[in-house]
Image (cartoon, rainbow, N blue to C red):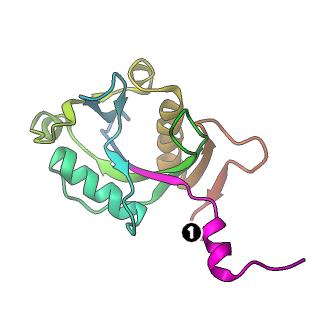
């Protein structure tokens, strides 16, 4: 077997799109969702990872750009594999813990981002009507991860069929 020259090998490697979001929740486990101006489904704050940007930097940047919130992020809660969807290539979505947020803080958000038309706190059941099914699964997994202290793996928002669902964090 002949090996490719390193440059050719590197050029042949698969490229994946990457997204990162933030789970903000209140003391009743309602999650903060953003209504976008460019599609009917709601989202958690977040977006596409730019070239040479770490996913956690993306999550913090998007949180600030979309909602004007600057805060330290907590643990990585979810890693979700997203298969190819039409023109969108396969990818990975990361969800980081943004901590607790109060109703008062949410009411005070005045987004200047033209992509965001409104924000609100929603239960997991309410979110089911607002977000796509894979994101709903990701949000449920993220709430589980907050309570269990485990990073949760998903495939299109569902538990993977061949791997353990969780990895214990810490000692």
Residue 59 appears in which quarter of the rendering?
A: bottom left
Q: Residue at x 65, y 52 (%)?
A: 166
For the magenta stretch, what is the residue range?
1-20
Number of labelled discs?
A: 1
Q: Residue 21, how many percent across, how many down?
A: 38, 48
Q: Is residue 69 left or right of residue 123?
A: left
Q: Is residue 45 above or below residue 118?
A: below
- Quadrant location of the C terminus in the rendered image: bottom right
Q: Residue furthest right?
A: 1
Which residue is more in the foreground, 34 or 2? 2
Q: Residue at x 76, y 41 (%)?
A: 161
Please give the residue where the numbered disc 1 appears in the rendered image. Answer: 170
Q: Residue 151, how many percent across, how many down?
A: 56, 54
Which residue is more in the foreground, 73 or 57? 57
Which residue is more in the foreground, 66 or 2? 2
Q: Residue at x 9, y 38 (%)?
A: 110
Residue 167 appears in which quarter of the rendering?
A: bottom right
Q: Is residue 18 magenta?
A: yes
Which residue is more in the foreground, 18 or 97? 18
Check disc 1 and report its element: helix, strand or loop.
loop
Q: Is residue 125 above or below residue 36?
A: above
Q: Residue at x 28, y 29 (%)?
A: 38
Q: Residues within 10 Å of mark 1 (few under 14, many from 20)?
A: few
Q: Residue 79, how many percent across, how many down?
A: 55, 51
Q: Is residue 80 above or below residue 76?
A: above
Q: Residue 104, how many percent across, how many down?
A: 13, 36
Q: Is residue 149 left or right of residue 159?
A: left
- Quadrant location of the N terminus in the rendered image: bottom right
């Amino acid at each position: 077997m002949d090996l490719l020259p390193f440059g050719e090998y590197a050029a042949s490697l698969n490229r994946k799109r990457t997204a990162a979001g933030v789970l903000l929740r209140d003391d009743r486990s309602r999650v903060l969702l953003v209504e976008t101006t460019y599609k009917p489904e709601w989202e958690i704050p977040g977006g596409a990872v730019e070239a040479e940007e770490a996913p956690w930097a993306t999550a913090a940047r998007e949180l600030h750009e979309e909602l004007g919130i600057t805060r330290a992020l907590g643990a990585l809660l979810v890693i979700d594999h997203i298969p190819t969807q039409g023109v969108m290539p396969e990818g990975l979505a990361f969800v980081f813990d943004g901590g607790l947020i109060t109703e008062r803080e949410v009411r005070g958000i005045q987004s200047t981002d033209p992509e965001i038309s409104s924000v609100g706190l929603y239960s997991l059941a309410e979110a089911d009507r607002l977000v796509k099914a894979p994101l709903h699964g990701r949000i449920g997994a993220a709430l589980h991860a907050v309570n269990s202290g485990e990073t949760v793996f998903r495939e299109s928002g569902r538990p993977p069929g061949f791997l353990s669902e969780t990895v214990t964090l810490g000692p």
